[in-house]
Image: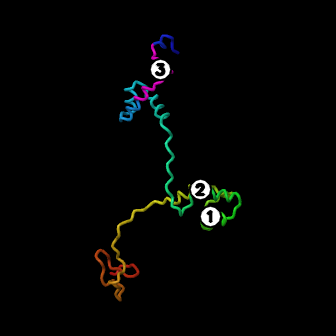
Amino acid sequence: MTTPDQDQNRPQRRGRPLTQERATYFALVNEGVGFREAARQVGVDYRLTKRWRTSSRPAPPEPEPPAISPRFLSQDERLMIADRLRAHTSVRSIARELRRPASTISREKHRNQQPDGTYQPYRAHALAHTRRARPKTAHSPPTRSCGRSSRMGWTSGGVRSRSPAGCAATTPTGRSGT
């Protein structure tokens, strides 16, 4: 608990807008000064500047969905499929409306149908996105083939007549020829 004497010694900041300090703080931060150092230079508490940063910063924009090839169903198309399936529309008429093959709609329905028989388009789109993202494996450099070539045939004894450098002579069964 504070006494009236202590309240008189405390600077009267409560209620006073700190617009000048705030503008100075953000100018320093934009120049590259660290958050704590800018707060110290302006003469305000670091915790207050954290509140300024979070309240003045608008929410980050939603990331743009990656461009999907037209050969894949879009989320809008999946929503339309779900609406039409709830209305008990036939698969062929849904396909006609979306200008897609009926097999695509049927496959989508059966692949993403829930155990209770419902089709959930947002879940279906998320699952399709994870199925589509496959890791790309690096191609290994080509290795020298020790296989049969047109110039090197097998001898009557099953041993290769000539073998390329680095390959052991083998029989057609894969056993060593020696």
Name the residue located 53 percent from the left edge and 15 percent from the top edge.
1
Q: Which residues are magenta?
A: 9-24
Would you say 95 lies left or right of 171 here? Answer: right
Three-letter amino acid code of the residue under disc 3: Arg
Alpha-carbon span between mark 1 and mark 3: 65 Å
Q: Residue furthest right?
A: 88
Question: For mark 2, what is the residue?
Answer: 76
Name the residue located 45 percent from the left edge and 17 percent from the top edge.
11
Comes first in the chain, label 2 or label 1:
2
**SS for tag 3?**
loop
Q: Residue 46 is drawn in which quadrant?
A: top left
58 above or below 140?
above
Q: Residue furthest bottom?
A: 156
61 above or below 117?
above
Three-letter amino acid code of the residue under disc 2: Asp
Question: For mark 1, what is the residue?
Answer: 105
Would you say 173 lies left or right of 98 here? Answer: left
Label ID, residue 13: 3
